[in-house]
Each structure stands twice: as structure tokens, then as C-alpha cells.
Image (cartoon, helix red, strand yellow):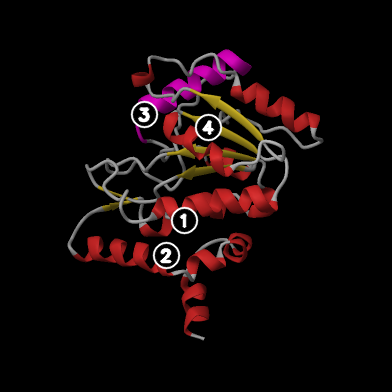
Amino acid sequence: MESQIKLEKIKIEESWKEVLKDEFLSPYFAEIKAHYLTAKSQGAILYPPAKLLFNAFNLTPFDKLKVVLLGQDPYHQPNQAMGLSFSVPNGVKIPPSLQNIYKELQMDLGITPSKSGDLSPWAREGVLLLNSILSVESGRPASHQHFGWQHFTNAVISQINLRCENIIFLLWGNYAKAKKVLIDPNKHFILEAAHPSPLARNGFLGCRHFSKTNAILQQIGKTPINWNLNP
């Protein structure tokens, strides 16, 4: 009964809760929670806000999933992190990596760069904007990499790999590419590119992943993603 009550307390979309229930009830997830609560009790400012920790899952239900876009860990400056990889809330300055994503979108599909960095519309279209690490301390990038979040998000990728077919995985940068071992290329599609960060010397530009993703979706009889974020 106790484990069931714990599961009820986790605020995550119901289809994902069912898929991931064994993870939520595992000892390692209890450790993640303990690390998180300890950091909070010591007065650390944590991002994203707790209510947005599982935002990626809440906006993209398991049965609506078409694309997985992997990031590393949340933005660590105030008001940036919103539980979606690469995304920042409307009104927040667009980070350099996202600026490059918008440049590629314009080169690839002719879409004018959005003035907003909020990628929630993509999530609602079926793009799981998943960071490998789901929390961070203010001003300290990768500060929660020892919490065990990677164990959890690797399990997410493994469950998608096992339970789904024809999901498109966008792996940008070496960190994301390392997750390739969790994905069966005979069941799914894997598109790889350099990280969109300017530090990758713009190797990302020209990958054409947006048009390639939509071509695959059409080929398998699914509705393409509307990548246009403009009103």
C-alpha cells in the first residue's frame, strides 16, 4: 500500500506513470528524490520549478510520441529552465543553442525564427523534449549529474525502444549520441548531428533534421510535425 501511495504522489501524465511505474517504485528513484530534497532543504535554488520537473512527459503523452529530442541538463540561470530540452519560457532571452536551432529551421524549412524560445508547441505535436538530467542548481551546470537522473532517463529511452516502433530519435552532440546503444535501429530511426551550441563550431547547421523527420513521418503514415512556432 505504501508504494502505491508514493506512486499516486508523483505528478506525471497517466500514460507515462503506467509505463514508468517500476522506475518510480525502485530504490534508485528513492535516492534521486532524497538527493533532490536534501539540496532543497539546504537552501539551494533548483531549476526547473518542481511543478515542471516532468513537463516533457506531461506535454507529450506516451501514446502521442513521434520524436525524441535529447538534451543534457536544464538551463541553470533564473527563469530559463521549464522542463523541456532547449526550451525557455516566452519572454526569456533565446540561448545560443536555440538560436542555432532556429537558424537551421530557417535554412531547412524556410521558417522565420520565432521571437519566443518556448518549444511547448513542439511537445504537443509529439516531440518529447527530454533532458538526460532533470534538475540543476542555480548557476551550477551539471550540478545534479550524481543524483541518478541518467538512470531514470535511460530507462525512459529503453521503455520507448521496447514498447514503441518507428520513433525518430534526434541525437545532437556526443552526449546524446552516447544513448544510441539503448535504441534498436531496426525498430526506430536515428538522426545524428553535432550539438547546436556555437561551441561545436556550427557543425549542427545543415543537418536538415526537421525536413528529414517530416519525410520519415510521412513515409510511415504519420502526420508531420508543425515546426513553425510563429503565431
Q: Nearer the viewer, mark 3 or mark 1?
A: 1
Work out how far the residue at label 3 is from the one at label 1, CA to CA, in angstroms: 26 Å
Q: Which residue is mark 1?
A: 152
Query: Earlier along the polypeptide chain: callout 2 or callout 4?
Result: 2
Mark 3 lies on residue? 95
Q: Is residue 35 among what the camera can see?
A: yes
Q: Report the amino acid beneath label 2.
A: Phe
Inspect the magenta stretch and tell me whether residue 214 lies in it: no
The mark total stands at 4
Q: Which numbered disc flags the more N-terminal residue, 3 or 2?
A: 2
Front in this rendered view, residue 113 or 21:
21
Element at label 4: strand
Q: Amino acid at mark 4?
A: Leu
Residue 121 appears in view: no
Magenta-tinted stretch: 92-109
* Residues marked 1 and 2 touching at CB (< 8 Å): yes
Mark 1 residue type: Phe
Q: Does label 1 or label 2 sit earlier along the sequence?
A: 2
Residue at the left extreme, as displayed:
42
Magenta stretch, overall SS? helix
Gap in angstroms between the C-alphas marked 3 and 2: 31 Å
User: Residue 29 got which mark?
Assistant: 2
Q: CA distance from mark 3 to mark 4?
A: 19 Å
Q: Quadrant of residue 107?
A: top right
